[in-house]
Image: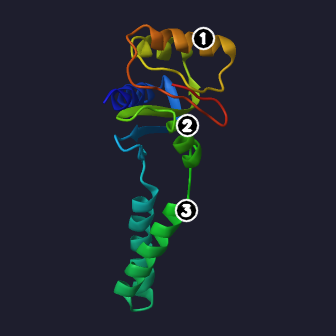
Amino acid sequence: QKAEEVRQKILAMQREYLIELGDAVVVVKDQAGQIKLNQLINLTTTGAASGALWGTLIGFIFMAPLLGTALGAASGALGGKLTDVGINDQFMKDAAAALQPNTAGLFLLIRKMTTDKVLADLRGSGGTLMSTSFDETKEAALREALAAAAPGETVAGTSQATAAT
């Protein structure tokens, strides 16, 4: 899947300190039109794991470690489910409605980047820019970099601060 390949390429750039991401989500629209968000971090699972750990520790204090683990995991999972960090999930679902069935999009929240190097690495990735908060010059450069290849899956960008793909 092209969107996941581009996300992996961008994550590699982040390890090289060329880009600083706040979020990177692959959105897939299946044949039936259902939209699935593939987040980098599953907050529900993370919350359940940390809640279980803290619940166990607190449970040991009150001599009920199993009860503490269960309550901690449940409250952690609920907290993780209710937490939305990065790009707003509803915004991504609304924007993904424009995708054709059996395609994917990539949403990025970019905090900082070395523009010339990132665009050079993205050149030829394909895709269509749907939304960005970049200024016109950066947006035009990004469109040009993406258009350097044959159109592939849609690549979308968004941000509350600064972002794009």
* Residue sitting at x 41%, y 43%: 33
Give the Cα separation between the discs numbered 1 and 3.
36 Å
Q: CA distance from mark 2 to mark 3?
A: 21 Å
Task: Give me the disc on residue 31.
Answer: none
Give the SS element for disc 1.
helix
Mark 1 surroundings within 10 Å by alpha-carbon count, few (fewer than 14), some (14 through 19), many (20 or more): few
On screen, residue 59 above or below 127: below
Residue nearest the observer in this picture, 50 or 155: 155
Closer to the chain start, of discs 1 and 2, is 2
Which residue is denoted by mark 2 in the rendering?
Answer: 95
What secondary structure is found at the residue carrying circle 2? helix
Per the image, the residue denoted by label 3 is 82
Quadrant of residue 77 within the rendered picture: bottom left
Observer-nearest residue: 97 or 152? 97
Residue type at mark 2? Answer: Ala
Which amino acid type is shown beneath numbered disc 3? Leu
Which residue is depicted at the point 45% across and 63% down? Answer: 47
Which residue in the protein does label 1 denote? 140
Which is in the foreground here, disc 1 or disc 2?
A: 2
Q: Secondary structure at mark 3?
A: helix
